[in-house]
Every structure is written in C-alpha cells, then in structure tokens.
Amino acid sequence: MNDRIDHDNTLRTANQVFEQIYRHASVRRYRPDPLPRATVEAIVAAGQRSSTSSNLQMFSVVAVTDPDRRARLAELCGAQAHIAQAPVFLAWCADLSRLERASVRR
C-alpha cells in the first residue's frame, strides 16, 4: 500500500459521492425564467469533460430556446412535455465529422 494516500479521507469522499448519486432525482417542472448564457455554457462545458472513447468528444450541443422549436422537439421525442416547458433544451447530437477530422490528423 502507498503510505502517502489518505485512505480514510478517500473512502469518506467516495461515500459522499455515492450519497449524492443515491439522492439524485429528476425534476420535470421548470421555472419559465431564461437561463443566463454563462450558465448554459458552464453546463455544456461540464458535459464536455466527461470521458469518451479516445477522448474524441464526438458530439455537438445545440441549445434550443425558441418555444415553437422546443414544442416540436417535445413531440418528436415521444410527447415529452417537459422539453417544451423548459426554458432551454440542450440537444446532444452525435457529430461523426469530429471522428473524421481526428483520423485525418493522425
């Protein structure tokens, strides 16, 4: 074992993470207030830091704020009303052009 690792602290931190995961609940009622652009950008940036195969991040994100477009997306996604009700809908789209660009660079 590595003596420099604080195993008690590591276990305590892991338990806190697990507790947060277990407490997770989806909310489907949204306030109508628009989200500040900086907030949307921070959410997208956090998602972009998630692990992906070869760290390629093969997706693009489209923020949909137009109510008519959100309503149409809600229908296309199986009549999910919360999509239309949210002030912004983030559509995470597969972007295979990123894979093509990465393969050309290598």
Image (spheres, rainbow, N blue to C red):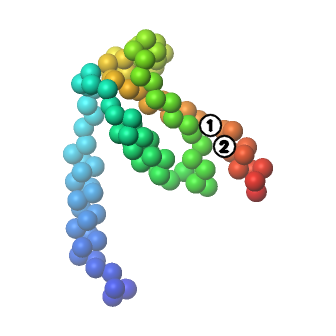
State which quadrant residue 3 falls in: bottom left
8 or 57: nearer the eye?
57
Say if 71 sits above or below 43 in the image: above
Check disc 1 and report the residue beneath it.
95
Residue at image position (26%, 65%) is 13
State which quadrant residue 80 falls in: top left
Tell me the kind of residue under disc 2.
Arg
Residue at image position (46%, 15%) is 69
Q: Quadrant of the N terminus?
A: bottom left
Label 2: how many residues lie within 10 Å, few (<14), some (14-19) or many (20+)? some
Residue 8 x, y percent position in the rendering: 23, 76
Q: Is mark 2 on a helix, strand or loop?
A: helix
Check disc 2 and report the residue beneath it.
98
Q: Quadrant of the C terminus?
A: bottom right
Determine if residue 40 is in view.
yes
Say if 28 sits above or below 22 in the image: above
Say if 17 sits above or below 64 in the image: below
Measured in 3D between alpha carbons, the distance from the residue under mark 1 to the one under mark 2, in whole angstroms, is: 6 Å
Residue 88 x, y percent position in the rendering: 38, 26
State which quadrant residue 99 falls in: top right
Residue 63 x, y percent position in the rendering: 46, 29
Q: What element carries label 1?
A: loop
Q: Are marks 1 and 2 in contact (CB under 8 Å)?
A: yes
Picture disc at residue 58: none
Tell me the kind of residue under disc 1.
Asp
Residue 62 x, y percent position in the rendering: 50, 30
Residue at image position (25%, 43%) is 24
18 or 100: nearer the eye?
100
